[in-house]
Image: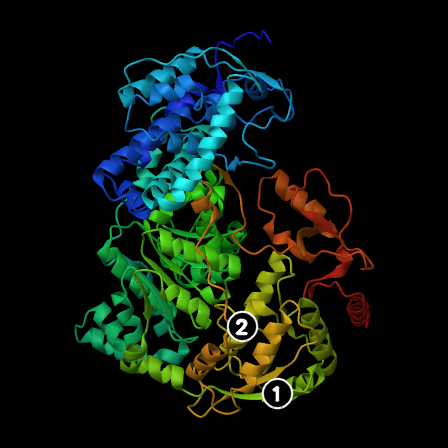
Amino acid sequence: MNSKIPDQLFAKSGRNGREFTLQSHLKDAEKAVLEIFRPEKRWFRNWCRFFKITEQADREKFLLHLRIAALFHDIGKANEEFQSLVNNKLDGRQTLRHEHISALILHLPQVRGWLAQNKNLDLEIITSAVLSHHLKSADSGDWKWSQPKGTPFLQLYEAHDEINNVFDRIKEITDLPDKLRLENEIWSEKSPWLEAQNDGFETARSFSRILRKDNERRNFLLAVKAGLIVADAAASGLVREGYENETFLDWINEKAHSQTIESDEVTAKIINERAKVILNSEKNQEKKKLFERKQSEGISLEIALDEVLWNDFQKKSSTLGKKALLLAACGSGKTIAAWKWAEAQSREYEIGKVIFLYPTRGTATEGFRDYVGFAPETEASLLHGTSKYELQAIAENPNEATTGKNYETQERLFALGFWGKRYFSATVDQFLSFLEHSYSSLCLLPVLADSAVIIDEVHSFDRQMFKNLVAFLEHFDLPVLCMTATLQKSRREQLEKIEGLRIYPNQIELEELKDLERAEKHPRYNLGFAENEQAALDIAIKEYNDDKRVLWVVNTVQRCQIIAQKLKKKLKIEPLVYHSRFRLMDRKNRHEETIKAFKQTAQAEIAVTTQVCEMSLDLDADVLITEFAPMTSLVQRFGRANRHLTKDEDFRARLVVYKPQGDKPYTNEDITLAETFLRDLGSKNISQRFLAEKLELHSKLERPLDGSARFLESGYYATRGNFRDIDDFTNPCILSDDKAAVEKLINDKETHDAYVVSVPMPSKKDAPIWILEESPGWLPKHLRIADSKFYRERYGFVADLDLLNELEETEND
């Protein structure tokens, strides 16, 4: 190969007349390191605390290694194929990924010997950060390091002046005595590259063994690997969006080095504003009068609220310390307790963010509406997969928290656009999936390290999520509060073993917290069994006709739809239907209708839902009917009845349970344990405390989790994993009738989330097939087209042909 050496090397394709040279990008990445991780600034200190890098010498060493990795990370782009690609002269797959070449160069004897002259350099850490910064490197499989995918040779330009200038910069910051110069060699599977590859694989294996025993070195590695991804994202994204020269450093300075949260800021911006809404509610008018009287007597706002509105359980949450698990019944005021804890952490630690994490998009949106949205629009953020659409909907229908506010971010900066926010309501995946090498989550890691974190509804985490939660709590140093109403015994015991984590309230505290004790011990429910679904249907109809608010929860969407249709025929009304298989625009409407229906007490209502009702949805039914489900799910479902104790002291919500037709989506063991649990509850005057005690007694033992995660265990390598257990039973689709609307939105670069519906994947036995075979080229690859004839606005996607025919007959009538 005798290709002409280009005058300039490029790191990226040019845009809008701008050129992105390789030399400038590598030096920009180093500048980003120095600006993001300025030693005198909070982000640097919190990053080092997060990764448990405590000694000043080690912190200085971290910064040096990160700068070297930033200067080295893309030198592999100096090759003929990549330069042809960025100049639009080459299509298709490259022979070697550029970061694989960069890491191979770091295993050339002359390069390794050059860097080894500085005895303070850990070459394995630099190389692993470089190799893994695109999260596509492994010792085998599709991303095997140095595994060619094209021709068995490749022209490199490592003698280019731009590369030499970068090497000279590395020499300058490391005080190396000699310059490094390489030849414009051809990579092949022969010497010296074969030796470099073999040395690399052997070094990676021995390094992995060392890391298992050396936590300090592993923490140092993780800080450098993640730091390089962050710096590269900033240097690439900001320059791409027009922040050139020093302006991209100004942007980083503004977003990263904002003011620390002040001691009373959380109270002023979130808690007090939420208190106003609570006091203005119809049920709290007496408390409002008392509060106003105290204010007129000159008592301060915070003290008056403490005396009138907040209970001891909420106020004492400020004493929990850095890591805690808050266990309290549904409707006990855990969210306010969590914000009070966050305020206490802002006094104890120098932080710039408060992050509230939820297991689902719906609960995150509700958390934003009720709490985070009170913060100034420049500081509040809703962050999940469809948050742009949700924010548009919130703007169209604002509440007390969101009226007149615009919460937009710099969309084209993706995760970086959230760096300047201070208060977050987000799904847990958005921040904690860095543990499984999610790129966007890694880009948000400086935000996470600068925060106090609240993780809600941890009882609902599947095994993979809970494993990642344990890893997060065990290996990283930051304030974290986990919350739930219920938790099976084995999981609670595992959390109790985490160093420094406190369970609140303990038994002694429970006896002292009279308000919480009274709320948890107050009899809320009477329990009865129905023989089957038909018997439950008869009960639902009678209770609705007796002017009760009836909530019926089932385990599958299909049964939810069928039961709703039966109620419609019997009662001659349109029952509320709420589950996960609606277009997002329709699901939002069904959600709001259901919430509204169960807030009022003046008239009968009936809703049929699936598990989506279990978490953080403020439903308050008089009668709750449910199929058997896992015990923690049942306790959460029961918490949707007589939730706020708004009726008289003698009122008991009626709970009706029955065995479903089949175990799915749960296991036979789940259903059998649930039945044993339910029959042990008795029938009268059941309290939430009693439920919790019986849950602990009957919980199945779960094998302890080892606290491992890809991010912690990958050593030299990094590939993407799954934060949650995989569910391959549904596919995101748009409906065939919506194609034109969606295409227009995509062409206009607007969000099309409103039209996306989760559709069950048809099996070979299914007839008819509702997912159409062909998808147009303009549609994102993860979406498919579903036949609109299977969809109903008030029932969602109907995969049952008999029910579909019945609905059509009803519509025709």
Q: Which mark is on residue 529?
A: 1
- Residue found 47% across the figure and 80% down from its top: 697
**Horizontally, is 440 left or right of 152 in the view?**
left
Q: At which x and y percent is residue 655?
A: 56, 84
Q: Is residue 420 visible?
A: no
Q: At which x and y percent is residue 363?
A: 49, 62
Residue closest to the eye, 597 or 734: 734
Q: Is residue 465 visible?
A: yes
Q: Is residue 263 above or below residue 137?
A: below
- Residue found 60% across the figure and 37% down from its top: 141
- Residue 265: image quadrant is bottom left
Assign a secondary structure to mark 2. helix
- Residue found 45% across the figure and 11% down from its top: 159
Q: How is the image coloured?
A: rainbow
Type of amino acid under label 2: Ser
How many discs appear? 2
- Quickly name the residue at label 2: 633
- Residue 248: image quadrant is top left
Picture quarter with the N terminus: top right
**Horizontally, is 511 left or right of 1 in the view?**
left
Assign a secondary structure to mark 1. strand
Q: At which x and y percent is residue 808?
A: 80, 67
Q: Is residue 219 above or below residue 359?
A: above
Q: Earlier in the sequence, mark 1 or mark 2?
A: 1
Type of amino acid under label 1: Phe
**Horizontally, is 179 left or right of 139 in the view?**
left
Q: At which x and y percent is residue 268?
A: 28, 60
- Residue found 45% across the figure and 87% down from its top: 647
Q: Is residue 706 above or below residue 773?
A: below
What separation in Å lies between label 1 and label 2 (alpha carbons)? 17 Å
Q: Is residue 362 above or below residue 538?
A: above
**Horizontally, is 261 left or right of 82 in the view?**
left
